[in-house]
Amino acid sequence: MSDKPEKFIDENGLRLDGRQIDEIRQMKIKIGVLSRADGSCYLEWGNNKVLVAVYGPRELHPRRLQKADSALIRYRYNMAAFSVEDRIRPGPSRRSIEISKVSREAFEPVVMTHLYPGAVIDVFAEVLQADAGTRTAAINAASLALADAGIPMKGLVAACAVGKVDGQLVLDLNKAEDNYGQADFPVAITQDGEITLLQMDGDLTQEEFKKALEMCKEGCRQIMEMQKEALRSKFADDLLAVQVPDEAAESIDVAATLEDVVEEDIIEEDVGAEEVSEEPSEETSEDDLAISEDAEIELAEDELVAEELDESDADEKIPDVEVEFVDLLDEEADEEADDEDKEVASEGSETREQ
Ligand code: CDP
């Protein structure tokens, strides 16, 4: 562990990492990074790197654990063995059990669990690299992974910490400030301003406590903006991939319907259907899938629905269909010795060679 710095804040009021006292670390967010999870998010915050996967709502086993009137949320915070300087012993620790509990409680007021009696929603938060503030980083990522899974929520949850170094309150502690500071005060806040997590290590006066809370609220407000932007940009990317018109994009509720819209349109685009009806019906999907079978695409409907294809994936599939089709033309051309068909076949061979 590095030694305690002599001073945490220099004569210009800047911290050791060059930040202002009320400045949060840079955050990078990527939503939907795991194809098997129902929702996922990778988040970097300063030197923290966390990955969150959400599974569910799904039936809870053993059944005796089921709640008759709501879904159960399970939250597992885990630090990878290699995430810190000293190796972390694998398996739950007192600290990780505590963080898992308080993080789960941070989401309970917003997740609409009453919609899924008997179900479970599993949140797995894996800390890949730790550098102070991992519980808050994981909560920020979990909030987006839950939204990505399409789980109905009253709003997002954002979290950050305030601490005290050199007798001054500072927002979003870095490692040295966390290790050697006089206080650590992590807070999670919902979109409605409700505080769903509040912990405190160290000492703060009543005045400092009030000020720290205000700083946390401001930090969480900024984080929530970034979370919303990340959702918007994921939504926009998906729409770009499936070419949904802008007007439709504006009218769609991201958290609730993003997956449905994207999945339906992927089916249509993937099978190469030229005509996409404005309101896709079950009939349309079946027709399209029939075309898919003719073209000998071996993907099952479930796989198509489950896959989140980006633009490049979609591009890769279309040539496959063309090659199959050209093969058929090749055979017909041989049999009937039709000049026109031959021309198409030779063009097709070129395509295949490319
Ligand atoms: O990470 P967070 O601030 O939520 O929790 P903490 O218990 O205050 O830990 C602060 C930091 O100490 C972590 O982010 C890690 O960088 C480090 N740490 C460590 O090196 N080894 C541990 N077993 C636990 C924490």
Image (spheres, rainbow, N blue to C red):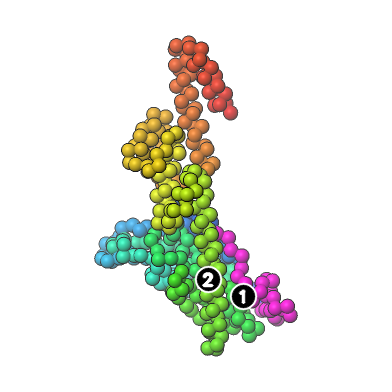
Identify the amino acid type marked 1.
Asp
Query: Can see residue 55?
Result: no
Query: Can see residue 120?
Result: yes
Asked if residue 58 lies left or right of residue 41, the reply is left
> From which residue to which does the magenta span run?
4-29
Indicate yes or no: mark 2 CB to ligand 1 under 8 Å. no
**Could you say where residue 262 lies in the image, as x and y percent from the top left?**
44, 47
Residue 220's disc is 2
Main SS of residues in magenta: loop
| Label 2 crowd (10 A; few <14 / some 14-19 / many >=20) | many
Residue in the image at 47% along x and 49% along y: 247
Q: Residue furthest front?
A: 247
Front residue of 74 and 29: 29
Quadrant containing the C terminus is top right
Q: Earlier in the sequence, mark 2 or mark 1?
A: 1
What SS does tag 2 mark?
Answer: helix
